[in-house]
Amino acid sequence: RKAQIGVTGLAVMGRNLARNFARNGYTVAVHNRTYGRTRELVEQFGGEGDFVPAASSEEFVAALERPRRVLVMVKAGAPTDAVIEEFAALLEPGDVIIDGGNAHFEDTRRREAALRERGLHFVGAGVSGGEEGALHGPSIMPGGPPESYESLGPMLERIAARAPDGTPCTAHVGPDGAGHFVKMVHNGIEYADMQLIAEAYQLLRDVAGYSPAEIADIFGRWNEGRLESYLIEITAEVLRHTDAATGRPFVDVVADRAEQKGTGRWTVQTALGLGTPVPGIAEAVFARSLSGHAELRAAAAALPGPQTRDGGGRMAPDEAAAFAERVERSLYASKIISYAQGWDMMRAGSEEYGWHLDLSATAAIWRAGCIIRAGFLDRIRGAFTNDPWLPSLLADPAFAKELGEAQQAWRDVVAAAAAGGVPAPGMAGALAYYDALRSDRLPAALLQGQRDFFGAHTYQRTDREGTFHTLWAEDRSEVRA
Ligand code: NBP
C-alpha cells in the first residue's frame, strides 16, 4: 500500500495532523528526525488508522504515492529550510511539499520560488487551532500554486474544521506566501481580540468592582450574544478557575507578564511596511511587551493615580450592571474596528503581492477551527460577499449601524477607564480610529504645515490643484513647488 500523504515532524502539531488524516481514512506515512517519536506515534495511536512508519527520509519518500505530498511540521526557521532541502533532493517534479508550520510569509515566498525552479510545488499552509484543532479539525490556509490544491485540497477539506453551515474551513488562499500571510493576520487579530477582552475584564473588576467569578458569569452571558466566540468562552473558563494551591482565583496567582511568540509582531512590522494602519493590533503587541518590562513598571509604580478613584470600591448593583452593558458595547465596537484593520491589511497585502485574495473566503474559513472562531466571522463573510470591493468593514451598512448604536457607550467606557486610571489602550485606540476615520478634517493639515515649515516638504491645498510651499523664512508668500 502507498500513503496518500506523509507527515514529517511529529511533535504535537505534526502528530495530531497525522492522526487526523489517518482517522479520516487516509494512509499516512510518518517520519521524524528522531525515530523515537515515530515509534511512539504508532505505538500509541496506530489503532486509529493506517500509518506507515518510516525510519529514514528515503523510506518515507518511497512510501508515498505520486504525486507525493509531504507535510512538513517542524520548528519554523532554519529547521524548516533544512527539512525542505532534505526532501526536495529526494522528490520529483510535480511532487508537493507543504509547510504547515508558522513560517513568515516572506520565507514562504522565497521557498516557493526556489522550489518552483526545481519543478516542485510548494504550499505554505497556515494552520490554526493549536494542538486540539490539529487533531479534531483546524482552520487551514494553504497558499501556493493553484494546481497543487487540486489533489491536496480535497484531503485538507476532509481534515479541516467545519463551519456551522457544513463547509470545510479551508480554501486555496492565493499564490506563494498568501496562506502564511493570512495566518499571520489571523494571529494579529487574535492578539487584538485578546487585549480587548482583557481590558473589558479589568474594567469590570476595577471600575465596577466585580469579582473574577462574577466576571466569568458576565462573559458566559456575552458568549450567548453577538460576542459569541471561542476566546470569550475560554475567558469565562479561565476566570472561573480557582487555584488549587491557594484557593484564590487563578487569575490572581498568575504573573502578569504576557509572552508572545512573534506573529503579532510580524503583523505589525508588515503593516508598517505596507503603510496600513493597524493600531488595534499594534496596541495589543505593545501591551504585552509593556507587561513584561519589570524595570519600567517598577520605575513608575509610585506615580499618582486619579484622585477620584475610590480604591477599588464596588458600584451599586444597578450601576454595575449598566456599566457592564456599556463595556459589552465598547468591546463589540472595538472588535469590529480591529477586524476592520485586519481586513484592510489583507487587502493591502493582496495588492502589494498580486494575490487576488478573496476577503469573503478568508472570513469563511475562520468561522471554525481557529482561535478567533466566532459567529461574527460569518457576518464579515456576508459583508464581503455583498460587496467584494467594500473599502472598509466600517462601510458595511450593518456594521456601521452597530457602531453608531455602540458609540456613546463606548465613549463612556473609555472615559471611565481614563477617569479610573485603568489602561485601556485597545478600546481607546479603537475609538480614536473610529473618530479619525469619520472626521471631516484631521489635524494632518497642521502636520503638513509643520513639515513645510522645517523641511520645505510642500503641501496640497483644499481649493486648488497643485503642490505648494510657503516661504516661511522670508515673506511667507506661497509659491508653487
Ligand atoms: P516544534 O516547533 O516544537 O518542533 C519540533 C519538531 O521539529 C520535532 O519534530 C523536531 O524533531 C523537529 N526538528 C527540529 Br526542532 N529541528 C529539526 C531539524 N533540523 N531537522 C529535522 N527536524 C527538526 O513542533 P510543534 O510545536 O509541533 O510545531 C510544529 C510547527 O507548527 C511549528 O512551525 C510551530 O510554529 C507550528 N505550530 C503551530 C501551532 C498552531 O496553533 N498553529 C501550534 C504550535 C505550533 P526531533 O523530534 O528530532 O527533535
Image (cartoon, rainbow, N blue to C red):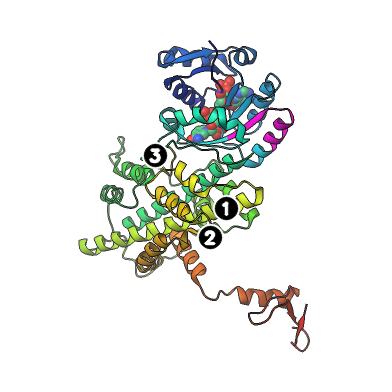
**In terms of sequence position, does the residue under pointer 1 or pointer 2 come before the other?**
1
x and y, in percent, of residue 220 in the image:
28, 47
**Could you tell me which residue is drawn at 32 percent across and 62 percent down?**
326
The residue positioned farthest toward the left in the image shown: 317
The residue positioned farthest toward the top in the image shown: 1
Image disc number at residue 184: none
Taking 444 as reference, is 333 above or below it? above
Q: What element carries label 1?
A: helix
Please tell me in which quarter of the rendered image ligand 1 is found.
top right
**Could you tell me which residue is drawn at 47 percent across and 19 percent down?**
26
Is there CB contact under 8 Å for labels 3 and 2? Answer: no
Q: Give the range drawn in magenta.
A: 110-124
Q: Which amino acid does label 3 sit on?
A: Ala
The residue pinned by badge 1 equals 347
Q: Can residue 302 be seen in this view?
A: no
Specify the quadrant that holds the C terminus. Answer: bottom right
Q: Is mark 3 on a helix, strand or loop?
A: loop
Whether the magenta-drawn stretch holds residue 112 is answered as yes
x and y, in percent, of residue 374 in the image:
38, 45
The residue pinned by badge 2 equals 391
The residue pinned by badge 3 equals 163
Q: Distance between the residues labelled 3 and 1?
A: 23 Å
In the image shown, does 382 or 223 lie closer to the viewer? 382
x and y, in percent, of residue 343 in the image:
52, 53
Q: What element carries label 2?
A: loop
Q: What residue type is labelled 1?
A: Arg
